Image: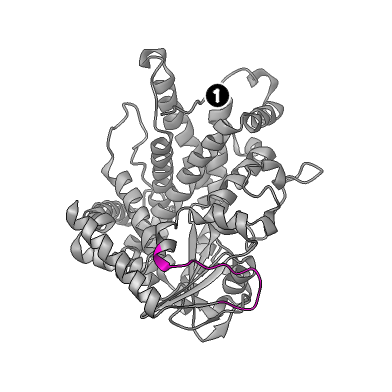
């Protein structure tokens, strides 16, 4: 532990010296600015600033400059719209982001410009195919009936004893991993099953990689590159993590290639499309498969975990969801076990409102990176250049009182429902949980369907209590 402590002390001290002697914090004439006293203070309090800034100010933007590093931190919705939609083609993924996300290789998440446009066209056309939507829906509904329910029944069985518990986060991670692999790779790894596997290396690897990529996207490159060089912190597990995932995707893609040659298998899974489009390039399907797993698994599992924590703290919201479910299912099933279909799920307005509220407060991706091709002035008044990393804090954006009202920090699903009981749709730059503009998530509808069916199944058929301590 001593070497680690020494290294972190050196890193923070170095940042402090840079800040005191070289940094310039640019403050436009607008009144909504607030900056940190030091860069180390910002880094040390990174996990706490969403709530603090939502309470203290209406908008937050801060440009920090040190030698070799320029980062604009902002939670301004207008800037979000400007960079992600209105002036989309003037901005890219951000300087250094492709390097930070090197594990995703040539996937669409790492592309810009013409390459991204062409790849996006392929994906958009595929997501619009009826057969793919049917496959995704079938994969999710089947997983609920054949895996989620048996696992929950297992842990709820009297044989497990009154003190039996299950890690819901782990359960949701395995559920979303299996479903994503099913409609993405035409294969169900069955990590969610009875008996309950104590450890699933590939699922753990996805979580570890996700944590590293989020950490890299918010930390100065010098920090994570030094960690990688010394082989410490989160970076020490990267080689092992990437190898586990590389072996898994390679195995599944080889299987898909064989099935394609034999004319069998899931014709409309996303992996099969990648293979047919990539021709002789074997790396692109592998990169896209990994990106798909990270995107599909992360959104669903994180949202469901926070959702049930919110319900535990807000029993009135859970009661309203339960009543809404009883109103739309057959009378004979009100007090019986019930599995939901897509038509029933579409009627659950309050449930979707509660999920939107969860995503507002805890978006799966807390920050979004951008960079400008040319020098320009943003709506905040800040001048940025090609070497400026623009970090848009989606978590702060979802808590701004100027946007969401004085109760912006409260879990309140009612804010998403109109007077006539219909779901209220907010513009993506205000609610960017699924990104905004041309890069908006193509799997948004699938993610909502997946979270809704899991949430409805558990709320109606089970009584979940959070184990404290």
Residue 58 image position (x, y, % from top left): 65, 61
Where does the image place residue 14, in percent across and percent down from the top left? Answer: 30, 71
Mark 1 residue crowding within 10 angstroms, few (<14) / some (14–19) / many (20+): some
**Residue on which the image places disc 1:** 461
Colour scheme of this structure image? Answer: one colour
Q: Is residue 64 above or below residue 398?
A: below
Camera-nearest residue between 156 and 415: 415
**Does residue 106 lie above or below 189 as drawn?**
below
Main secondary-structure element of the magenta-colored stretch = loop
Task: Specify whether residue 347 is in view.
Answer: no
- Residue furthest to the bottom: 375
Asked which secondary structure carries label 1, the reply is helix
Q: Which residue is at the front of the view, 307 or 442?
A: 307
Magenta stretch: give its range. Answer: 27-40
Q: Residue at x 35, y 31 (%)?
A: 193
| 83 on left or right of 237 | right
Residue at image point 32% right, 29% down: 196
Asked whether residue 455 is in view, the answer is yes
Q: Please determine whether, in this image, residue 468 is positioned above or below residue 451.
A: above
Vertical comparison of 42 with 172: above or below:
below
State the image coordinates of residue 377 (x, y, percent, origin top left).
59, 82
Spot occupied by residue 254 in the image (x, y as percentages of width and height): 27, 55
């Amino acid at each position: 532990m001593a070497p680690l402590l020494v290294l972190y002390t050196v890193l923070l001290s170095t940042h402090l010296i840079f800040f005191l002697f070289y940094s310039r914090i640019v403050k436009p004439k607008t009144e909504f600015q607030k900056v940190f006293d030091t860069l180390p203070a910002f880094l040390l309090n990174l996990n706490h600033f969403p709530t603090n800034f939502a309470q203290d100010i209406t908008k937050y933007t801060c440009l920090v400059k040190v030698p070799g590093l320029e980062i604009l931190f902002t939670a301004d919705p207008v800037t979000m719209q400007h960079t992600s939609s209105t002036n989309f083609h003037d901005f890219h993924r951000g300087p250094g982001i492709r390097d930070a996300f090197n594990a995703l290789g040539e996937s669409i998440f790492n592309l810009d410009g013409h390459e991204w446009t062409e790849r996006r066209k392929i994906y958009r056309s595929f997501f619009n195919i009826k057969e793919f939507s049917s496959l995704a829906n079938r994969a999710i509904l089947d997983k609920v009936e054949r895996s989620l329910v048996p696992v929950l029944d297992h842990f709820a069985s009297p044989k497990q004893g009154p003190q039996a518990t299950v890690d819901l986060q782990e359960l949701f991670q395995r559920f979303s991993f299996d479903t994503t692999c099913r409609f993405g790779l035409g294969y169900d790894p069955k990590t969610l099953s009875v008996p309950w596997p104590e450890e699933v290396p590939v699922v753990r690897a996805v979580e570890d990689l996700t944590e590293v990529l989020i950490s890299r996207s918010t930390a100065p490159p010098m920090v994570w590159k030094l960690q990688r060089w010394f082989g410490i912190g989160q970076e020490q597990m990267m080689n092992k993590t990437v190898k586990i995932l590389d072996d898994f995707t390679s195995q599944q893609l080889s299987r898909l290639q064989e099935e394609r040659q034999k004319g069998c298998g899931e014709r409309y899974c996303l992996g099969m499309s990648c293979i047919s489009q990539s021709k002789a390039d074997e790396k692109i399907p592998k990169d896209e498969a990994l990106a798909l797993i990270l995107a599909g698994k992360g959104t669903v599992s994180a949202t469901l975990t926070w959702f049930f924590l919110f319900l535990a703290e807000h029993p009135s919201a859970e009661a309203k969801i339960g009543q809404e479910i009883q109103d739309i299912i057959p009378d004979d099933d009100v007090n019986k076990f019930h599995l939901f279909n897509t038509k029933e799920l579409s009627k659950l307005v309050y449930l979707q409102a509660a999920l939107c509220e969860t995503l507002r407060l805890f978006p799966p991706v807390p920050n979004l990176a951008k960079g400008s091709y040319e020098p320009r002035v943003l709506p905040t008044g800040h001048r940025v250049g090609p070497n400026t990393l623009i970090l848009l804090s989606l978590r702060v954006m979802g808590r701004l009182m100027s946007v969401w009202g004085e109760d912006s920090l409260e879990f309140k699903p009612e804010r998403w429902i109109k007077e006539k009981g219909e779901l209220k749709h907010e513009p993506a730059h205000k609610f960017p949980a699924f990104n905004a503009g041309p890069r908006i998530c193509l799997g948004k509808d699938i993610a909502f369907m997946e979270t809704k069916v899991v949430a409805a199944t558990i709320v109606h058929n089970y009584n979940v209590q959070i184990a404290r301590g």
